[in-house]
Each structure stands twice: as structure tokens, then as C-alpha cells.
């Protein structure tokens, strides 16, 4: 029997469809993508949520594949076969988007293959979720699951819970937060990323933009617009500061100390404040909440290391110079102003920075002693203040009383359910 052109087209389409549907089936073998030991490094509820979301993405692909196979069998005319070809291309793109989603989570989960790293990341999960619960619980908003993962680089990042994944149909099942290797033992940057999630769920950024614009307005409309455009990163900084105090500020300083070209970089549309102003804004938060302290010396050193005269762009230099005197007002606005996002309260009514003031942290350490670092009760209930305490000590004491990296690692491992290192 002689094959027609339509038969040849159908055969090629069937072959391609078989290839892509078989690939979609393989995506469902999640234990082939991330090691069982890595899945075991997740808390059970988190593993279930992640696996469910990824399985749903694969299930959607399989359903589309079955529908497309039926359409191919029913297609006879060149126009019908051409329509199937277009749908096959769409299916191929859908597969690649689903693959991106699944590979992202597989890579994240796979960073927990080592029991040691898994325990440290579970501690980060716990600290992150507790920080968000402090704001979202009183507002009767859901507190998302958290999946932290280890990666290289300088800065942290977040894929927010509730956002659509690359496949377009599946929502991110957790606030998925990148933890950099250099900050793993003092992960205050995780709190910054949690601030992004809280702002996403409450509408904080939009209100903060208006606050910042008003506080910066005396410096001119261009300066006010600049600060309003930075609201999303400023709210995240404020969230981290409220939970971890000066430790978060010192760690942010170390991340931003990237040389003059980076410190003075002012890009149109960039949501990140120019680093030259961002560090002094954070020290202004400390001064507004706590008065004078070591943050004053940090700020002086920063401005001396990066004199404004070194800014190569004259227009940027003028904007930065006009902004500097507004920092106290900007700090007061983001800390003290009541917001609809927080049911008519300021953030500090929900997360009082005074709980992580230097004197409060010293009193906490003196009152609880070694139990603060070893008791499951205190690790759970005071974990965020312990992070603030160890961050404070790392920033102000050459050899912190609890031991430098080893002491921080020990309590994080205990919080994450791992074995603390031998003394």
C-alpha cells in the first residue's frame, strides 16, 4: 500500500510526540532527579508539599500528551495535521518549562544530600518560618512552608511561595530561599528574603513606597522617586533588622563592600538601593532604634572608604548627596509609621527591634547561660534572638564568647536536628 504525504507527516508527528511524552513521564521519577537521602533531609510536611507540586506539574503534562495523541489519531487533512504540529510545539515548550521548574527544586533539594548541610538548612528553614509567622500570624495570613538551599555567590534570593512556576500552571509550594555558603553560619540574609515574602502577602511595598517618597521629598522630586523605587529592598532590609538587629546590618555591609564601581552603581529601574546609601540607611535604623553604638563607627568607616567624590557620575553624585541628610527621616518612616498592611500598626508593633537591642541580647545570654545554645526549648523559642546575638557578637567581638564559627554552627545544628560538633 502506497504511503501518502499525510501518512509520512503523521508518522513524524507520532515519533516526536512519543519522544516528548516519554520525557515527560521520566520527569515524574522524582527520586531520579534528587537523591532519596536529600529528600529525607526535608521536614516531612515540606517534602510532601514540594513533591505534590512537582507531581501535579508532570500530571498536567501527561494529560496534555494524551489529548494531543487523540488529536493526532483524528487528524487526516493537511490542515488538521498542521494544527497538531503547532500543538506539539506548544507541548514541547510546556515540557521545557515544567522541566525548568522540576530541575530547580531537584537542585535545591539535592543540596541536602549531606546530613550535616541538611541539618544546617533545616535550621534556616525554621528561623525563616518563625520570622514570617511573627508578622503573618497576627494578621491571620498563611505562613508558607520554607525550603532553603545552598548555593554560591554573594547575595541570597527567593522564589516566593504562591508565585506561578515556569510551567505557568503550578504555584511555588514553598518560599524557596537561596543561602550562600559564606553566610550559612550567620544566615541573617535569609530574613531579608523572608521580608520579600511578607511584603508580597501584605502589600507592604506599595505603602512603603509612598512613605519613602514623602520622607525624601524635601530633597526634591527626583530623590523622592528614587527612594520610592527602592521600597521592595528597603522593606526587606527593615524586616531583617527588626528580627536580627545590628548583626543583620553588619552582614549586609559585608555583602555590599564590593569596591567603588559596585558601591556607586546607580542603575535605572534597579530595585536595589545604591550601596553607598543602603549601608548608611541601615545604620540609621540602628541609631533610630538604639541610639549611639558601634554602627556609628561602621558608618564612618564606610563613608571614609568610599568618599562621595569618587562617584564617577556627576548626576548620581548629586542625588546621593541630596539623599544623605534624609536618612534619619527615612529610617523613622519605615520603622514607626502605622500601615494598613499591618492592620494599622507599624512593623515594630509586631516585631519590636528592642528585643534584639544590644542590652536585651546581653541580658538574654546572662539569664539563660549555656542552656540558650543547647536546650531544645530555648533554641525553638529564642532561635531568632540567638541568631541576633551571635550576629552581634560576630560583628563586635574578635573572639565571640560563644566561640566564633564553631559556636554558631553548634547551635544551628542542634536547631536543625543534627549532631553538634565535638568540643
Image (cartoon, helix red, strand yellow):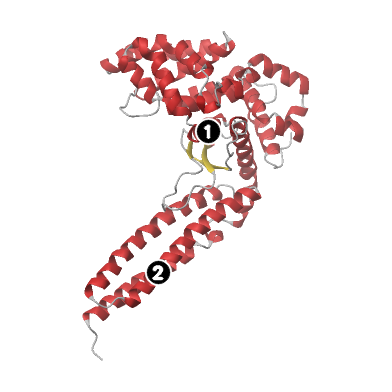
Spot occupied by residue 69 in the image (x, y as percentages of width and height): 38, 72
Query: Residue, x 35% and y 29% (percent of image)?
Result: 270
Q: Is residue 148 above or below residue 8?
A: above
Residue 298 versus residue 327: which sits nearer the camera? 327
Q: How many marks?
A: 2
Q: Is residue 174 left or right of residue 10?
A: right
Q: Is residue 58 left or right of residue 122?
A: left
Spot occupied by residue 393 in the image (x, y as percentages of width and height): 63, 21
Per the model, the C-alpha gap separating discs 1 and 2 is 40 Å
Residue 422 versus residue 321: which sits nearer the camera? 321
Quadrant hosting residue 205: top left
In the image, farthest residue toward the bottom: 1
* Disc number for residue 56: none
Query: Residue, x 57% and y 8% (percent of image)?
Result: 291
Spot occupied by residue 353 in the image (x, y as percentages of width and height): 60, 19
Q: Mark 2 packing: few (<14 Cα in 10 Å), some, or many (20+)?
A: few
Query: Residue, x 40% and y 23% (percent of image)?
Result: 273
Regarding mark 1 in the picture, which secondary structure is present there? helix
Q: Is residue 190 left or right of residue 77?
A: right
Quadrant hosting residue 366: top right
* Disc number for residue 67: 2
Q: Is residue 377 left or right of residue 197?
A: right
Residue 413 versus residue 375: which sits nearer the camera? 375
Q: Does the CB distance between marks 1 and 2 fall below 8 Å? A: no
Regarding residue 192, the answer to whether it shows in the image is yes
Regarding mark 2 in the picture, which secondary structure is present there? helix
Quarter of the rendering occupied by the C terminus? top right
Spot occupied by residue 139 in the image (x, y as percentages of width and height): 59, 31
Q: Mark 1 packing: few (<14 Cα in 10 Å), some, or many (20+)?
A: many
* Disc number for residue 198: 1
Of labels 1 and 2, earlier in sequence is 2
Amino acid at each position: 500500500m502506497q504511503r501518502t504525504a499525510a501518512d509520512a507527516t503523521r508518522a513524524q508527528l507520532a515519533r516526536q510526540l512519543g519522544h516528548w511524552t516519554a520525557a515527560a513521564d521520566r520527569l515524574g521519577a522524582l527520586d531520579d532527579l534528587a537523591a532519596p537521602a536529600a529528600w529525607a533531609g526535608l521536614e516531612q510536611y515540606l517534602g510532601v508539599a514540594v513533591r505534590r507540586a512537582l507531581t501535579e506539574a508532570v500530571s498536567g503534562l501527561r494529560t496534555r500528551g494524551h489529548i494531543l495523541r487523540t488529536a493526532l489519531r483524528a487528524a487526516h487533512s493537511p490542515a488538521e495535521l498542521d494544527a497538531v504540529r503547532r500543538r506539539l510545539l506548544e507541548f514541547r515548550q510546556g515540557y521545557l518549562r515544567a522541566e525548568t521548574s522540576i530541575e530547580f527544586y531537584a537542585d535545591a533539594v539535592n543540596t541536602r544530600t549531606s546530613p550535616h548541610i541538611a541539618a544546617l538548612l533545616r535550621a534556616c528553614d525554621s528561623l525563616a518560618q518563625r520570622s514570617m509567622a511573627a508578622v503573618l500570624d497576627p494578621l491571620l495570613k498563611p505562613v508558607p512552608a520554607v525550603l532553603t538551599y545552598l548555593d554560591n555567590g554573594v547575595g541570597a534570593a527567593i522564589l516566593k511561595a504562591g508565585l506561578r512556576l515556569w510551567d505557568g500552571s503550578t504555584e511555588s509550594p514553598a518560599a524557596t530561599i537561596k543561602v550562600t555558603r559564606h553566610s550559612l553560619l550567620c544566615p541573617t540574609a535569609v530574613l531579608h528574603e523572608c521580608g520579600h515574602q511578607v511584603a508580597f502577602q501584605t502589600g507592604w511595598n506599595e505603602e512603603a513606597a509612598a512613605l519613602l517618597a514623602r520622607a525624601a521629598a524635601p530633597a526634591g522630586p527626583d530623590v523622592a522617586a528614587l527612594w520610592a523605587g527602592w521600597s521592595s529592598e528597603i522593606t526587606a532590609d527593615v524586616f531583617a533588622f527588626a528580627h536580627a538587629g545590628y548583626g543583620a546590618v553588619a552582614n549586609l555591609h559585608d555583602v555590599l563592600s564590593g569596591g567603588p564601581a559596585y558601591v556607586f552603581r546607580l542603575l535605572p529601574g534597579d530595585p536595589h538601593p545604591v550601596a553607598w546609601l543602603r549601608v548608611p540607611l541601615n545604620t540609621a535604623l540602628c541609631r533610630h532604634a538604639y541610639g549611639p553604638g558601634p554602627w556609628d563607627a561602621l558608618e564612618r568607616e564606610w563613608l571614609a572608604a568610599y568618599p562621595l567624590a569618587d562617584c564617577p557620575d556627576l548626576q548620581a553624585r548629586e542625588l546621593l548627596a541630596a539623599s544623605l541628610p534624609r536618612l534619619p527621616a527615612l529610617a523613622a518612616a519605615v520603622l514607626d509609621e502605622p500601615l494598613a498592611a499591618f492592620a494599622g500598626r507599624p512593623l515594630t508593633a509586631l516585631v519590636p527591634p528592642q528585643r534584639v537591642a544590644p542590652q536585651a541580647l546581653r541580658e538574654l545570654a546572662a539569664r539563660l547561660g549555656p542552656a540558650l545554645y543547647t536546650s531544645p526549648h530555648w533554641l525553638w523559642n529564642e532561635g531568632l534572638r540567638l541568631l541576633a546575638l551571635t550576629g552581634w557578637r560576630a560583628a563586635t567581638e574578635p573572639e565571640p564568647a560563644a566561640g566564633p564559627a564553631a559556636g554558631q554552627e553548634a547551635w544551628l545544628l542542634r536547631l536543625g536536628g543534627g549532631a553538634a560538633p565535638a568540643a
